Image (cartoon, rainbow, N blue to C red):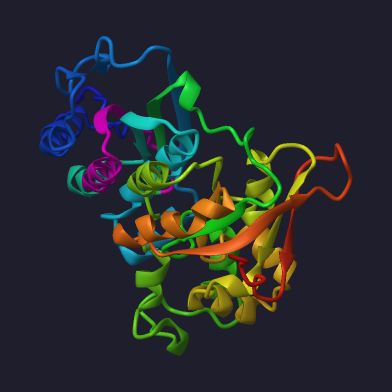
Amino acid sequence: MAKLTYRDAGVDIDEGDRLVELIKPHAASTKRPGVMGGLGGFGGLFALTPGRYREPVLVSGTDGVGTKLKVAFAAGRHGTVGIDLVAMSVNDVCVTGAEPLFFLDYYATSRLKAEEAAEVVAGIAEGCRQAGCALLGGETAELPGFYAPGEYDLAGFAVGIVERSEIIDGSKVAVGDAVLGLASTGLHSNGYSLARKVLLEGGSPLALAEVPPELGGRTLADVLLEPTRIYARAIASLRAAADVRALAHITGGGLPGNVPRVLPVGTRAQLHLAAWPLPPIFDLIRRRGELDEAEMYRTLNMGIGLCAVVPAADAAKALAALDGLGQTAYRIGTIVPGTHPGAEADVTLEPGPPPAVTK
C-alpha cells in the first residue's frame, strides 16, 4: 500500500521551491540601499543609513486587493493585481510623509501554480519599483480545502520612514487652504463588490470582453483591472514644490470618508464636484445600478485617488509640479470653518464649480 504524502493531501513542496526560484529575479530588481541578503531567509533584513535621520519614525501599513481579485480570476489576468497590492499599503504609508523602504507579501491559494503565482509576484515587483521600495520577502501558503479551486488571496505589508519633524498629520491645515485632487486610474481597489454586482451579476450582466460604448474602445476587463496608481513620486514632487499640510488616500469610504481623517477639529473641506471630470466607468456603474449620488461618493473614489491640502498661495506651483511629473490633478476645493466650532471635521460636496480664485 502506497504511503500518503503531503502532495497527496494537496500541498506540493516542490512547486513552492520552484516558485521561489521563479520570483528571485523579480525581487532582485527592486533592491535598494539598505537591503541585506536575498530571498530564502526566515526574515528580511534592512539596515537604516547611519546619521541620515535625527529622529527617525517608522511607518507601517497593511492591506489587500479585495474582490478585485474575482475579476482577475474571471479574466485569467494576474499580472497587475500585484501593483494594486503594493499601492494600497504604500499609498497609506506615503500620506504621512514617509519614504517607503520595503514591502512584504502574503500569497495564499488552494493549490499552488508556480507560473501563475510568479506572474502575480512580477506585478508586486513592478509596484515596488514604482514606489521606490524593496520587495524584501514574503510568504506563500498552499491551503487545500480553504480557498476555492483556482483562486488565491493577497495581503501586503509596507514599512516607510520619516523624520519626526516632517510628519504630515494635518495639524497645520488652516481655513482658506486649497484642496487638490490627484486623478485616480479608475476604481483602484475599492468598491468592487458593488461594481461586480452591478456590472457582472444580476439579470443582464456584461461580459468582461465586452466594449461598452462609454469606455472609449476599452474592454470592461481592461478598465476594471487597471492597476491602482502609486502616488509615492507624486507626493515627493508635491513636497518639493509646496507646503503640504495634509494628504488623504481615497479608498473605502470615498472622499467623504477619508478627507476628514486628516483635517483638524473645527475645519471642513468644501469640495466642488464640477472641478474634475468623472471617468466614464463611474457613470456606467451609477446608471446600471440606478445608484444615488451619495452612495456613489461614499463607496468609490469617483476619479480622485489622493487629496492634498496646501496653502492657497502654493496651489498653482503644486499643480505645475504634478503636471511636470505627468500626474493629472485639479484644485477641487477649499478648507472652510467647521459647521459647529469644536465639531469633528467633515466634508461637503457642492454640485457647482469652485469660485474664481482671487489674485
For the C terminus, which image quadrant?
Answer: bottom right
Q: Quadrant of residue 223?
A: bottom left
Residue 278's place in the image compared with 42, above or below, is below
For the N terminus, which image quadrant?
Answer: top left
Magenta part of the protein: which range? 121-148
Using residue 111 as the reference point, say whether residue 283 is left or right of it. right
Q: Residue at x 11, y 33 (%)?
A: 21
Q: Residue at x 88, y 41 (%)?
A: 341
Residue 7 appears anywhere in the view: no
Q: Is residue 200 magenta?
A: no
Percent of width and height locating residue 66 = 49, 49
Using residue 123 as the reference point, say whether residue 238 is left or right of it. right
Q: How many marks?
A: 0
Considering every residue shown, the one lying at the far front of the view is 359
Percent of width and height locating residue 205 = 53, 79
Residue nearer the viewer, 97 or 107: 97
Residue nearer the viewer, 201 or 13: 201
Percent of width and height locating residue 166 = 47, 27
Q: Is residue 135 magenta?
A: yes
Q: Residue at x 55, y 73 (%)?
A: 282
Q: Quadrant of residue 3?
A: top left
Percent of width and height locating residue 79 = 26, 55
